[in-house]
Image (tube, grey):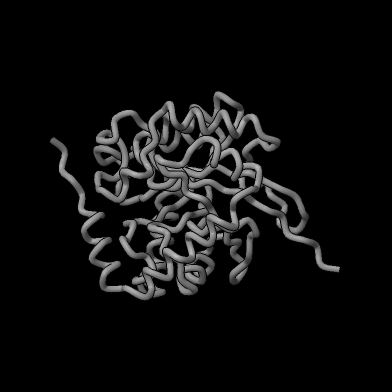
Amino acid sequence: MATRAPQVASFGYHEVTDDPATSGFQRPAALPFKHTRRAFAAHLDRIAAGPLVPTLVVNVDFTRPGRHLLLTFDDGGKSAVYAADELSRRGWRGHFFIVTSLIGTRTFLDANEIKYIRSCGHVVGSHSHTHPDIFRDQTMGQMVEEWRVSCDILAGLLNEPCGIASLPGGDLSPVALRSAAAAGLTHLFTSEPWLAPRQVDGCWILGRFGPKVRTSPARLAALAQFRGWGRALLVRRLTNAARVSLPTLYRFYVRRTTRERTAP
């Protein structure tokens, strides 16, 4: 008899800062994902009040039923150090995904900061090398190169293999999923709010809910207790359908919202 797969509630954060200009991407599309420290603390407090302690994906047994809660942070902005310290203060561990072409630039982590986060017991993985604005527009070869270059840089920096990544931009496609396995990744986080992990060519694919600035602590608490994921998935599917059916408009929107603002 087949064993029921676990349910994994993963949350995909980005920046945690009271000064958005000092951390991460400086583009309109990034602003909805830049939480203040106070708002982030309120989310963590609600998680702490629930039944599950955040764990690492490497500790999840995908062959056994059960419920798990994971925290992830995309891009590798400077505020990742603060987020990592806040998790450590609670005895929790998280996953930090790095855009490796941006290491050491003004608003992104440098090599020593990445090493520090890893030394605290957090997972450090790839968020691609260059963060293509629409990842699914890349060819299979380009996608594999994004993963391999990024993972090679992180492996050299941390002296350990890099096999875990998150999909940049959230633009999911069958080719994007296959590219992760082709590049040797063992786990890939998406921006689809799934609870049930699945495998593609031997790589575990995990869903995530991406809390925005407007995501209330009450809603975060419900999601952390595995309520409301069906609604979140429906909204995501409607958004994806609009992207696919209106590609020209979507590309115009991406170009407009991913234009970097220069520092004052």
Quadrant location of the N terminus? bottom right
Query: Residue reaching furthest left?
Result: 264
Question: Which residue is at the front of the view, 18 or 148?
Answer: 18
Percent across and percent down for residue 264 are 13, 35
Relative placement, left or right, of 262 versus 145 is: left
For the point 60% across and 34% down, the residue is 47
Percent across and percent down for residue 22 are 27, 33
Q: Is residue 188 above or below residue 140?
A: above
Percent across and percent down for residue 233 are 54, 59
For the point 33% across and 28% down, the residue is 18
Query: Residue reaching furthest top?
Result: 89
- Count of numbered circles on the image: 0
Question: Which residue is at the front of the view, 217 or 36?
Answer: 217
Q: Is residue 164 above or below residue 77?
A: below
Percent across and percent down for residue 23 are 31, 37
Query: Residue reaching furthest right?
Result: 1
**Which image quadrant for residue 149?**
bottom left
For the point 61% across and 42% down, the residue is 222
